[in-house]
Image (cartoon, helix red, strand yellow):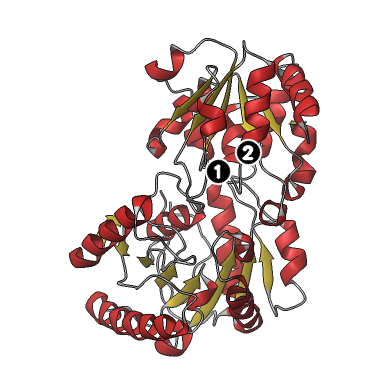
Amino acid sequence: MIPDRPRVIGGDVILVSTADWDNPHWTNKQHLAVRLGRRGMRVLYLESLGLRRVRPRGADLRRIIRRFLAFLRGPRPVAERVWVFSPLQLPFPDWRAIRVLNRALLAWQVRILVRVLRFKHPVLWIFNPLARWLKDVLAPAIVVYQCVDDLTAVPGVPSELVRQEEVELVQTADLVIVTSRPLLEQKQALSRRIHLSENTVDYARFATALPVPTWLSTIPSPRLGYVGAISSYKVNLELLAEIAENNPTWQLVLVGTTGEGDPDTSLESLHRMPNIHLFNAKPYDELPGILRGFDVCLLPSRLNKYTEAMFPMKFFEYCATGKPVVLTPLPALKEYWRLCYVGADVSSFERAVVAAMAEDPERADARREAARLHDWEPRVDAILAALGEVGDPSASLPTYLHE
């Protein structure tokens, strides 16, 4: 029997992301698109329109070429009822003339896509506030703004422009969703309807004990591991280097893309440490096995304006494995510090690692339970229930399809 689930007006969603679909560090944008598709909705996922000025060299140049080739392919199906499209956009979004041209280009592309895919009365689900104006092009049934980070604090972003556009979007959107309490405190005075939806986890996937990859199992224990973007504005690289130097028997394993969102990231201090092991990002399906191979999971976040509002996606993924978690005192995770070990500087972080490696196994059960309560399915239920309150309950709704 198919259970009753909250449903959305119409059933067509245009999701304006700040992440490319194939990014190995999956975010709530990709997860949400997949789950809406499974619920019977049709989703057009627009890859990142770009927030910061890019550099026509190195990783940025490779991404420009990759995105242009993706544009030539047109919309492509990537999951059940989910299409991805890479819009043609010019870099340098802080230049007014470029923004005007990009708006015209995107409006033209989206109008064509809506006709080709036969979308009707779509929900416009915006993650990038610079795409606020799309609501005037599409006349959507509902506008949702999902705020997952303080985008004004990302390096290279035109922060004042983003701030102005976001204020307007928060004030006019039918529903605003935020992923942390600090973001809630920032936005709630501006929004008519705001919903807190902390980042969550595919609990069944990460609670499953998958084999540890060979490349990881050959590294001696204790293995202290981090998975995610290795960017200097997010990760306290100096902290890690000093901890590795002070504790030569600890093996620090970092798995992820270097410099994402911050091409000035330098790993020189890490490369010179023999007990720091750096690996490129691995496929999402391999992450549970990788986390199983860690003795301690690390969240060595830098404490700054950006991370003040950040609720890391990986937090509940770590917790679902039961592994002890050591983190710097991120404000968005404050209510979960009791489940973990917290250190703000080198000495307190080292003490936290020692305590984590000697913890009572019962604490692992508490972390697993917290992760189970933050599984994706009930979270999507709550989001769609909030969205349903905005719309017309008498409208024709898509049939919920159970996974």
- In percent of the image, x 35 and y 84: which residue is there? 107
Residue displayed at 39% across by 18% down: 215
Report if residue 368 is visible in the image.
Answer: no
| Total numbered labels | 2
Foreground of the two, 391 or 402: 391
Say which residue label 1 marks.
201
Q: Nearer the viewer, residue 355 or 262?
A: 262
Mark 1 and mark 2 lie on one chain; the one further toward the N terminus is 1
Circle 2: residue type: Ala
**Circles 1, 2 touching at the beta carbon (< 8 Å):** yes
Q: Amino acid at mark 1?
A: Val
**Image point (77%, 65%), residue name:** 185
Whole-number angstrom distance, CA of label 1 to CA of label 2: 7 Å
| Residue 59, visible in the rendered structure | yes
The residue that disc 2 covers is 371
Q: Residue furthest left?
A: 73
Quarter where residue 76 is shown: bottom left
